Image (cartoon, helix red, strand yellow):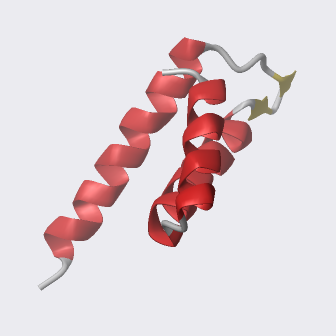
Amino acid sequence: MTLEKLQNDMKEAMKSGNHTRKQVISDMIAAIKNASYTPKGKVEITDKLVDEVLIKYQKMVQEKIDTCP
């Protein structure tokens, strides 16, 4: 997946009025942008970085779901 695809999906969610979907995609984009900043400096956002961050995001959300009663 690419960052541009996520941004386009967020625009579509905004146009359709789906606020929940827009917020989730916005959080994903923020996580990707935060991951591009490393102690050595800013790293280029590649498809590989996007995929890695989305996998981490998925695991985090799954853990939250599993711990909810």
Q: Residue at x 53, y 60 (%)?
A: 16
Residue 1 pos. (x, y %): 48, 21
Q: Is residue 7 above or below residue 14?
A: above
Tell me residue 12's x, y (percent). 57, 47
Q: Which residue is found at the position 15% from the left and 67% from the top?
A: 66
On screen, residue 48 versus residue 55, left or right, reads right
Q: Is residue 64 left or right of residue 68?
A: right
Counting every numbered tag in the picture gives: 0
Instruction: From this view, report whether residue 20 is shown above or below residue 32.
Output: below
Quadrant position of residue 27:
bottom right
Q: Is residue 40 above or below residue 22?
A: above
Residue at x 63% of width, y 44% of height: 29
Task: Name the one closer to the observer, 56 or 29.
Answer: 29
The residue positioned 46% from the left and 26% from the top of the image is 52
List the single residue furthest toward the front: 16
Whole-percent x, y for residue 43 in the image: 78, 20
User: Which quadrant holds the C terminus?
Assistant: bottom left
> In the picture shown, does residue 23 fall above or below 35?
below
Q: Position of residue 47 (x, y in %)?
A: 56, 14
For this rendering, which residue is in front, 46 or 10? Answer: 10
Work out whether residue 17 or residue 28 is closer to the camera in this orientation and state it.
17
* Outermost residue toward the bottom in this view: 69
